[in-house]
Image (cartoon, grey):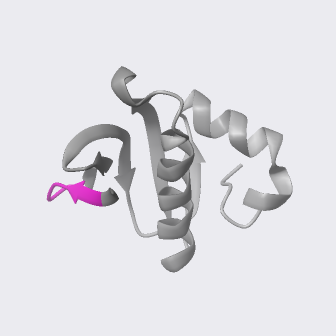
Amino acid sequence: MEKIEVVLDEKRKGKIELLSDGKHAGEMVISENDDAITVYHTEVSEAFAGRNFAKLLLDALVGRARDSNRKINPLCPYVFAQFKRHPDEFADVWKK
């Protein structure tokens, strides 16, 4: 069973973490402000490779941005590549 948790410090920096059966499976390093979420890095643990977990993290990030009416600044190469591949899907949240 997969679970997504958002962990932020008092400066609104932290991560979106993916747990699989209670074990750390991957994360996105992010920071937030009132207008945008910046994503710096996405990583999935090698033990969980090939299970589409990076996409689950991306879906959580995009959902968080849409729910709070914010844009995403995709500094992470994975997120940027997905935004470029599917511009229509992410047009409402992509901060260009």
Q: Which residues are magenta?
A: 5-11
- As drawn, the residue found furthest toward the top would be 46
Task: Give me the residue at 55% from left, 41% from top.
Answer: 52
Q: Position of residue 57 (x, y in %)?
A: 47, 49
Whether 29 is drawn above or below 2: the answer is: above
Q: Is residue 83 left or right of residue 1?
A: right
Image quadrant occupied by the N terminus: bottom left
Task: Give me the residue at 81% from left, 40% from top.
Answer: 85
Return the residue nearer the eye: 41 or 13.
41
Task: Give me the residue at 47% from left, 56% from top.
Answer: 37
Return the residue nearer the eye: 21 or 33.
21
Return the residue nearer the eye: 56 or 72.
56
Q: Position of residue 79 (x, y in %)?
A: 60, 39
Q: Position of residue 39 (x, y in %)?
A: 47, 43
Q: Position of residue 94 (x, y in %)?
A: 68, 55
Q: How many tags in the picture? A: 0
Whether 45 is drawn above or below 10: the answer is: above
Q: Check residue 51 for magenta coloring.
A: no
Task: Give me the residue at 53% from left, 68% from top.
Answer: 63
Q: Is residue 83 left or right of residue 32?
A: right
Q: Is residue 63 left or right of residue 14?
A: right
- As drawn, the residue found furthest toward the right would be 88
- As drawn, the residue found furthest toward the left would be 10
